[in-house]
Image (cartoon, rainbow, N blue to C red):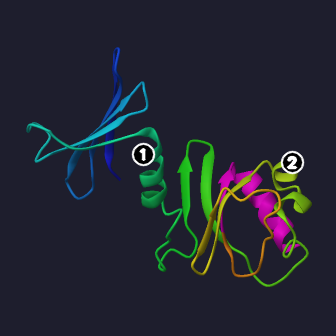
Amino acid sequence: MSIVRESDLIGIGKKYQIETEAGDHMVVVIHDDGKRELYRSEGADQETHCVMTLSDEESRQVAGIIGGLSYKPKALDTMELALDDLRIEWYKVGAPRDGVHKSIGELGVRQRTGASIIAAIKEDDTVINPGPDYVITPEATLVVAGKKANIKLLKEILTS
């Protein structure tokens, strides 16, 4: 696992120093205005060089790409990411059951489970933040966010 050091930059924002498993050194500066700057260095004590500057919107797009919201490598059929109590899981919908062929709104996903479907992927079609009218179909992969118990409830609704 990578090593991440966080520090406040008074009047600017936050700075994250990251040393990856591969030995790469990176610095991310998040400005209070939403701008992000990415820096790279050859080593922990070496001079850093700005690689790029991103707007808040660009940063979120890149985060989605890196996090696998738009493309999930085939080797990762089920994937899980945990951030404190928040979990993000990729769940492949199986054969038709009671919860399949119904919309997110009909199932009352957020109200009944506390989990949120943040993306739905089927073949080459990806829907980011599907609304209550989105119909869940077999073979779709849902990107689900919530606490472990909330996600478990959602899976139960889809397989009951």
Front residue of 7/123: it is: 123
Q: Residues within 10 Å of mark 1 (few under 14, many from 20)?
A: some
Question: Closer to the N terminus: mark 1 or mark 2?
Answer: 1
Q: Dot 2: what SS?
A: helix
Q: How many marks?
A: 2
Classify residue 27 as left or right of residue 100. left
Q: Is residue 157 in the magenta section?
A: yes
Distance (Cα) linking label 1 and label 2: 30 Å
Q: Dot 1: what SS?
A: helix
Q: Which mark is residue 37?
A: none
**Residue located 79% across and 85% down the image:** 95
Which of discs 1 and 2 lies nearer the camera? The answer is: 1
Classify residue 43 as left or right of residue 91. left
Q: Is residue 84 in the magenta section?
A: no
In the image, which residues are magenta? 142-160
**Residue located 82% across and 70% down the image:** 158
Q: Which amino acid is tagged 2?
A: Gln
Q: Is residue 12 above or below residue 128?
A: above
Q: Position of residue 53 (x, y in %)?
A: 29, 41
Q: Give the residue pinned by disc 2.
A: 111
Q: Give the residue pinned by disc 1.
A: 59
In the displayed orientation, state which residue is furthest to the left: 46
Front residue of 21/106: it is: 106
Front residue of 12/14: it is: 12
Q: Which amino acid is tagged 1?
A: Ser
Front residue of 95/56: it is: 56
Please tell me whether the stretch drawn in magenta is mainly helix, strand or loop: helix
Q: Position of residue 18 (x, y in %)?
A: 28, 43
**Residue located 73% across and 76% down the image:** 93
| Quadrant of the rendering where the C terminus is positioned | bottom right
